[in-house]
Amino acid sequence: MQSESIPLPRDAKSEDGLSLDAIEHLALANNPAIKQASAASARAGGIRTQVGLKPNPLLGFNGAQVGDDGTDQYSIFVEQTFVRGNKLAWNRRVIGHDVNAMNWMIETQRERILTDVRLAFYGVLAAQKRLELSNEFRTVAEKGVSISEAQMKAAVGTKPDVLQSEIQLNEVDLAIQQAEYDYLAAWNELVALVGIPNLARTSLVGTLEAADVVRNEENEYDRIVAISPSLAAAQARVCRAKANLQRQRVQPVPNVTAQLGVGHDLATDHEFANVILSVPVPVHNKNQGNIRAAYAEYCAATQNVDRIRLSIRRDLARVMREYQVAEVSVRQYEQNILPKAKEVLDLIAEAREVGEFDFLRVLTARRAYFDANIKYVEALGQLAQANAKMDGLLLTGGLADAVYYERDDGLRSQALSGQ
């Protein structure tokens, strides 16, 4: 699918490149994991319809004493099984909870994809910014080589100054290459998540500036637990297991099979009717095994909810650490490190002009300022990604977690069986 055939939201794309809104729009429209989850939900909906269908009537013909002249009896009959115990309604109630769970899994998959896209987007944005800084610093480093060479020719500089400035330029070139590789890898990851691997490379429009948001671990936990679609899906499975337990308890209620037939007796030349009623007697099979299995399934489903709650708390602890480390790093660089590094660079450059410092001190200060800016961008990227994980309810791995619905219409077969 070509990207130009996909409509983008208004104002999502500018002349400068793609925004996060545009990337998210493309991902939701093209990512196969969401379509797969939707197909699983549709399958569950079809099975919900099937398990509640009544059995078809049976129409038949009966011939008795055929070939015995004058005593033949011929009749036609209709047979119908009446499902008792409200089993078919319980079937649909059980699978209805499966449909609910599948719908929550669609939302889970959607959040996973969006979180992955945001993580990759900020990865690309950080690499893009590092590349810009490296290219800007290369201009400065290149100018430094020219200055050192000119000073050596004027006998006010030395060969080591030239070599040191050239080394710094080589290191910047290496940083540019590394940033380009990082950018390419992050871009390829992003377009794979979007579902358009051949999407042409373009710049991204966005910012890594830290949002003025204070995160509290307990508040974040309460918020995630309250709206987590994966937890809601697990709770729907608890409802499903509880409904299935009740469904299995009504299984021993016997169905009634009724047969009505009318025919003609050649021996008497009279019409006759037959009525047959049959009911299985639950003496040996009272569905006791399935009831125990359903109760075990219910216990497992409730434990799964507790497990997910604990996993949310564990994952949140890890992400909160990432957030706190990145947040304090960003603040330190903004408030202390970057201003001081810039001031040192300016002071040394001024002192160098009047001969107070050698050229090596200038190179060292320049490199320190460059490294501080690169690390600041990395910290901004890490902070943006930690925020994205919490905003995405800690749900990641959109392409790794396929959603299937593997149940069948076995409940209907069980409902029609009296054995």
Image (spheres, helix red, strand yellow):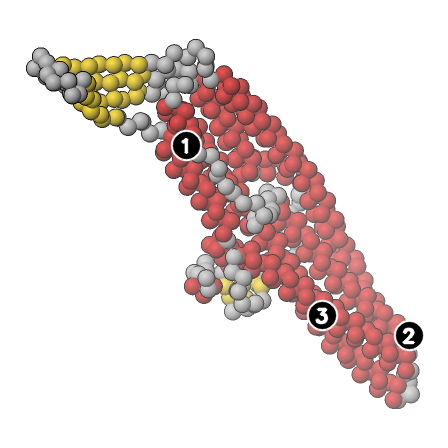
Q: Residue at x 70, y 72 (%)?
A: 135
Q: Amino acid under label 3?
A: Gln
Q: Mark 1: which amino acid?
A: Asp
Q: Nearer the viewer, residue 258 or 231?
A: 258
Q: CA distance from mark 1 to mark 3?
A: 58 Å
Q: Nearer the viewer, residue 252 or 234?
A: 252
Residue at 47% x, 17% y: name it: 287
Q: Nearer the viewer, mark 2 or mark 3?
A: 3
Say which amino acid is labelled 2: Phe
Secondary structure beneath label 1 = loop
Q: What kind of element bears circle 3?
A: helix
- Asked if residue 378 is positioned above or below residue 104 in the image, the reply reads below
- 320 to the left or right of 293: right
Which tag is nearer the camera, tag 2 or tag 1? 1
- For marks 2 and 1, the one nearer the N-term is 2
Residue at 17% over, 20% down = 66
Q: Earlier in the sequence, mark 1 or mark 3?
A: 3
Instruction: Find residue 235 and name its label.
Output: none
Q: How many marks on residues?
A: 3
Q: Is residue 49 above or below residue 243?
A: below
Label 2 residue SS: loop
The answer to whether residue 361 is left or right of residue 383 is: right
Is 131 rendered above or below residue 289? below
- Across and down, in percent, residue 374 comes to 74, 63
Tell me the CA gap for discs 2 and 1.
Answer: 84 Å
What residue is pinned by disc 1?
A: 409
Relative side of 109 to 323, left or right:
left
Q: What residue would you read off at disc 2?
A: 357
Residue beneath disc 3: 177
Q: Closer to us: mark 1 or mark 3? A: 1
Q: Residue drawn at (64%, 37%), measured in percent from left and top?
A: 312
